[in-house]
Amino acid sequence: MRQEIERKFLVVGNGWRNAAGAGKICCQGYITAAPVGATVRVRLFGEQGFLTIKGPTRGISRPECEYEIPAADAEYMIENLCGNRLVSKKRYTFEISGMIWEVDEFSGSNEGLIVAEIELESEDQPFGKPEWLGAEVTFDSRYTNTALALHPFAQW
């Protein structure tokens, strides 16, 4: 099982858009959504479906297994197994100084929220911070996608 090691930041301004490209629509739902424990997520990312199981977070790391599934299966699970535990966003992925950044521009009940993530090889790996990064929210559980599915940004 691979470890996901991730740092998360709010995005300030539009400086990131120059490097971003077109982005890809992502709809994801949570079959089980435990902000502190394990989660089972299904995602329709463009034309691809994924089933992801994540274990509890320790520090900025958590175990993760992700499997590609047929898009039709992902659609069915989102519509029939996730209830209202849903997140919609457009994801932009790009490289800066040899590091891959993902910027999620949320829609629906999380409209107005833009978050940047970077995955690291180790918890103490250094990385450059682009000028459009705002406050770090890695340790603020409200900004996890699981929490946003349960308590959307619009309700804060």
Image: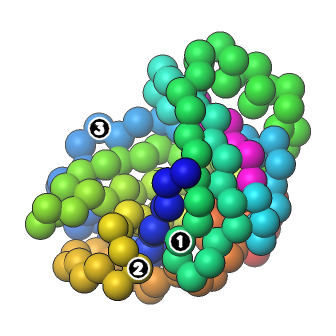
Q: Which mark is residue 106?
A: none
Earlier sequence position, callout 2 versus callout 1:
1
For the residues carrying marks 1 and 3, which lies nearer the camera in this image? Answer: 1
Badge 1 element:
strand
Of all residues shown, which one is farthest toward the front? Answer: 1
* Contact check, label 1 and label 3, Cβ < 8 Å: no
Badge 2 element:
loop
Earlier sequence position, callout 1 versus callout 3:
3
Chief SS of the magenta region: strand
- Apparent side of residue 116 relative to residue 107 in the rendered image (left or right): left
* Crowd tier of the residue under label 3, counting other residues whose Cα lies within 10 Å: few below 14, some 14–19, many 20 or above: few
- Provide the residue designation for mark 2: 123
Badge 3 element:
loop
Earlier sequence position, callout 2 versus callout 3:
3
- Provide the residue designation for mark 1: 61
Vertical relation: 76 (above or below) 108 = above
Hey, what amino acid is under mark 2? Glu
- Provide the residue designation for mark 3: 22
Separation of residues labelled 1 and 3 (CA atoms): 29 Å
Numbered range of the magenta stretch: 39-44
Hey, what amino acid is under mark 3? Ala
